[in-house]
Image: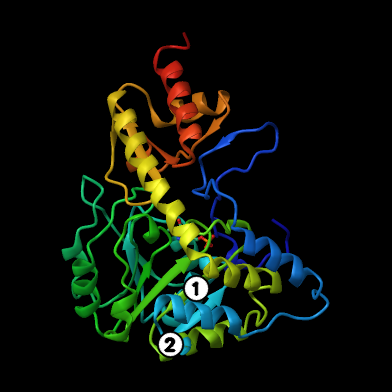
């Protein structure tokens, strides 16, 4: 730390992204990316925009917003595009939370939430998940705090039914409820349609997981025109060109070929079911994941040992040191072939490296 670093950040513990090592080629199952490349229209769109990079991007992302409006059936003034959904989440924290409006979220969830809160001086409450790692919905009923819930949750993959989300939103009418739907395309129930009914509901989604654009950084949020206007105020006060030209075009192009991505999501769901069954046969317990990853635990091998063993064999998965989940590994669902490699290497590790 330099002697110039602001005291207000001195104790900030940054978010730790999954490792992206370059030392060798890994089967990469640690950051929930899509194993499938972007669709053809995305390649063309990016190339075409590259020839116009001397010009700033459209700060309103109009072509993208209009296409999102069509695909999701919501008016453009209910939409905002962001540099990854992480940015949408942080704008929401900044816009709606402060000392008088603290935020609550599960103790086991996306690791960025406490970081956004710490960084922006927002008080927060971490509400423990049930022993089976499900969200206890009653804990959130009428708590009179802002709330953020990933649905499906990460890293558990467990989803709440829409009726529970609605109860939480309806019981906290004077607080903003943010539903992070990063994984919704893999089997969750989206709350988008409730955004017309509740002016305190903000739904955040991303192109990083189901739409194969993690490297492009594109997310979006849907809410009442008033909530969205507040987020635009933060956006224009941070970076009006937050979504670059190539990403805006890539996102639009991806939506014109949405069927390809939704088919890929179906493939992932089938591969997830197959892999879960196979891994259970090997003595693991697996949470009921509605996301593009599995959260697994084995009575005879620690999460860290499995993670390290797999890494040695060229397969990267994610292990979290957090006490409650340190026995687990989170494994991204890749192609069927990648899953076969995972299972083979797991067998070697469990069999004592035969
Ligand atoms: C991956 C992820 C995000 C954000 O991803 P972006 O790449 O910034 O869009 C947000 N929330 C959860 C729960 C995630 O897993």
Please identify the quadrant where the N terminus is shown: bottom right
Residue 81, labelled with which disc?
none
Q: Position of residue 163 (x, y in %)?
A: 19, 69
Ligand 1 within 8 Å, label 1 CB: no
Residue corresponding to mark 2? 75
Q: Position of residue 244 (x, y in %)?
A: 68, 73
Q: Earlier in the sequence, mark 1 or mark 2?
A: 2
Instruction: Pick out the residue farthest to the top.
Output: 354
265 is higher (above) or lower (below) than 74: above
Badge 1 density bin: few <14, some 14–19, many ≥20, Cα 10 Å: many
Q: Is residue 119 shown to the viewer in this render?
A: no
Seen in the image, is 100 located left or right of residue 161? right
Give the secondary structure at mark 2. loop
Q: Position of residue 217 (x, y in %)?
A: 60, 64
Q: How many marks?
A: 2
Give the secondary structure at mark 1. strand
Quadrant of the rendered image containing residue 161? bottom left
Quadrant of the rendered image containing residue 62? bottom right
- Residue shown at the point (45%, 25%) measured from the top left: 305
- Asked whether 18 or 33 is in front, the reply is 33
Q: Position of residue 312 (x, y in %)?
A: 57, 24
- Residue shown at the point (70%, 64%) measured from the top left: 44
- Asked whether 35 or 240 is in front, the reply is 35
57 is higher (above) or lower (below) than 319: below
- Residue shown at the point (70%, 74%) measured from the top left: 245
- Asked whether 83 or 323 is in front, the reply is 83
Seen in the image, is 6 located left or right of residue 152? right
Seen in the image, is 5 located left or right of residue 9? right
Residue corresponding to mark 1? 220
């Amino acid at each position: 730390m330099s002697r110039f670093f602001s005291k207000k950040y001195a104790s900030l513990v940054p978010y730790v992204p999954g490792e992206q090592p370059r030392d060798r080629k890994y089967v990469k199952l640690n950051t929930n990316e899509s194993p499938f490349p972007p669709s053809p229209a995305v390649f063309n769109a990016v190339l075409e925009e590259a020839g116009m990079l001397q010009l700033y991007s459209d700060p309103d992302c109009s072509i993208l917003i209009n296409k999102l409006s069509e695909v999701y059936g919501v008016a453009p003034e209910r939409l905002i595009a962001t540099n990854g959904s992480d940015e949408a989440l942080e704008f929401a924290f900044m816009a709606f939370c402060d000392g008088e409006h603290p935020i609550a979220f599960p103790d086991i969830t996306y690791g960025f939430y406490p970081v956004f809160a710490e960084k922006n001086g927002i008080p927060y409450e971490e509400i423990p998940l049930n022993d089976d790692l499900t969200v206890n919905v009653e804990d959130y009923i009428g708590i009179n705090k802002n709330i953020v819930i990933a649905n499906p949750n990460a890293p558990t993959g467990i989803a709440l039914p829409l009726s529970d989300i609605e109860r939480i939103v309806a019981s906290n009418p004077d607080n903003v409820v943010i539903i992070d739907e990063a994984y919704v395309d893999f089997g969750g129930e989206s709350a988008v349609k409730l955004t017309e009914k509740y002016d305190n509901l903000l739904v955040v989604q991303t192109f990083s997981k189901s739409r194969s654009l993690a490297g492009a950084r594109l997310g979006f949020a849907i809410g009442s025109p008033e909530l969205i206007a507040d987020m635009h105020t933060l956006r224009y006060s941070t970076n009006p060109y937050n979504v670059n030209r190539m990403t805006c075009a890539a996102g639009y192009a991806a939506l014109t070929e949405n069927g390809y991505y939704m088919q890929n999501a179906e493939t992932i769901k089938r591969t997830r079911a197959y892999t879960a069954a196979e891994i259970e046969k090997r003595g693991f317990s697996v949470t009921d994941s509605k996301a593009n990853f599995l959260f697994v635990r084995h009575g005879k091998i620690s999460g860290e040992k499995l993670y390290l063993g797999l890494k040695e064999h060229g397969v990267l998965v994610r292990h979290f040191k957090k006490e409650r989940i340190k026995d687990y590994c989170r494994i991204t669902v890749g192609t069927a072939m990648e899953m076969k490699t995972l299972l083979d290497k797991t067998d070697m590790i469990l069999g004592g490296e035969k």
